[in-house]
Amino acid sequence: MTTTDELLAANERYAARFDKGGLLLPPARRVAIVTCMDARIDPAKALGLDEGDAHVIRNAGGRAQDALRSLVISQRLLGTREVVVLHHTDCGMLTFTDDELRDKVRHELGADASHIAFLPFKDLDESVRLDVAYLRASPLIPADVPIRGFVYDVRTGTVSEVSVEETAAA
Ligand SMILES: [Zn+2]
């Protein structure tokens, strides 16, 4: 029995008591959250979200560059108008460099990953600031969309805002 089989068994129990079939497609709270795929983060529990409330866009590190495609769809087609960037302590992205991972791929798979930017980072707060700045600067994200950045502490469950220097708004 694979883990996938276990998931399917769990879904049978879930679907048997499912009662959220009437939710609308656009997120009710009009927010998109960009966060890491880290298994220790449950955005719904940590941020008080119910089904239908928000878009949660997850990738390794919660990197904005990787999420831009989804954010444009979220905002232009599905009505979200606020963005939360949420990185976290003890992130795997702090543990490697692009060259190290490319070497590992080459050695273990015999494959070339030189065209992939894995987007690791060395400084957690700085990665949040960079991602907020990236979205702020993007012509694909309207200037009046609130974008705030945070760090989730995997040991305490707390979320702390990362102060981002004001862009030249005036
Ligand atoms: Zn992470």
Image (cartoon, helix red, strand yellow):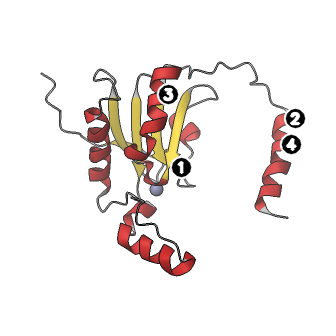
Spot occupied by residue 43 in the image (x, y as percentages of width and height)? 54, 41
Along the line of sight, the residue nearer the viewer: 138 or 167: 138
Task: Name the kind of residue labelled 1 in the image.
Answer: Ile
Mark 1 and ligand 1: say if the CB distance to the nearest ligand atom is below 8 Å: yes
Q: Amino acid at mark 3?
A: Ser
Which image quarter holds the N terminus?
bottom right
**For this rendering, which residue is in front, 25 or 44?**
25
Q: Which residue is mark 3?
A: 74
Element at label 1: loop
Whichever of callouts 1 and 3 sits on the residue coming sooner in the sequence is 1
Residue 140 x/y as whole percent: 35, 29
Amino acid type, callout 2 = Ala
Q: Label 3 CB, ligand 1: below 8 Å?
A: no
**Is residue 45 left or right of 106 when viewed as pictured?**
right
Q: How much space separates mark 4 and mark 1, taking CA atoms?
A: 24 Å
Q: Which residue is mark 4?
A: 12
Work out whether mark 4 precedes mark 1 in sequence or the reverse, and give the earlier one: 4
